[in-house]
Amino acid sequence: MKKLVLLIIAAAVLMIPTFAAAQTATGTLTVTATVNSSISLVFNNDVAGVALSAGAGTNTATLNFGNVSAFGAVAAGITRTTTATTFTVSTPVDVLVTKANSASANYTLKAQLGAADAVNTWQVGGTTVTNAAQATITATGAYGSNVAEAIALTVPFTTANATAISNTINFTATAN
């Protein structure tokens, strides 16, 4: 019986859970960063103009004048003028340039056509733009406000009916 009691006590001792000492590890992460100043340019719809057909609020937008002609009705938001040999359609598009972490007081806005156009004339804010070089649209733009820039396309009367006209205007804002 003694052996049985000892065996029961030994079995009971083996069934008691044992707790291991908690294991821990530590570490230190040093984090560094350097803040760079930056500016952002986006296109927005102008309330007086044709709504952007894509990309409003981004830096890659699309403006579609739709069907245009020298005479007859024009769509809302389009202004048309004619001369003896050409007609011009224009509409304002808002350009918003913002800054962060910068002491820059203002910015310079430039524009350039993406491809040559030997037939039509393009303007931004009254300044003719070509693909040859960037044209200065404004030398001291104010940050943080939508600025209406008139996008104008001048078409000769000699252009054939149903001619599709397309180009890109590349804008660059540079902190002063």
Image (cartoon, helix red, strand yellow):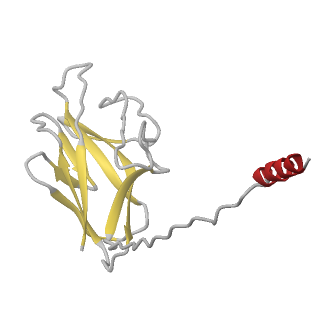
Q: Is residue 104 left or right of residue 12?
A: left
- Asked if 146 appears above or below 107 in the picture, the reply is above
Q: 21 or 78, which lies in front?
A: 21
Residue occupying the point 43% across, 67% down: 144
Q: Quadrant of residue 67?
A: top left
Q: Nearer the viewer, residue 35 or 67?
A: 35
From the viewer's perspective, is residue 40 above or below residue 59?
A: below
Front residue of 127/169: it is: 169
Q: Quadrant of residue 53?
A: top left
Depth check, front residue: 26 or 73: 26
Q: Residue 5 at what x, y percent from top left?
A: 89, 50
Task: Return the residue found at the far right.
Answer: 1
Residue 140 vs 89, above or below: the answer is: below
Residue 20 to residue 32: above or below: above
The residue shown at (37%, 69%) is: 99
The location of residue 106, given as percent across then percent down, is: 31, 74
Q: Position of residue 131 (x, y in %)?
A: 12, 45
Quadrant that contains the C terminus:
bottom left
Residue 83 shown left or right of residue 54 in the figure: left
Mark count: 0
Residue sitting at x 24%, y 32%: 166
Residue 36 in the image: state x and y as whole percent: 31, 71
Q: Residue at x 28, y 45 (%)?
A: 152
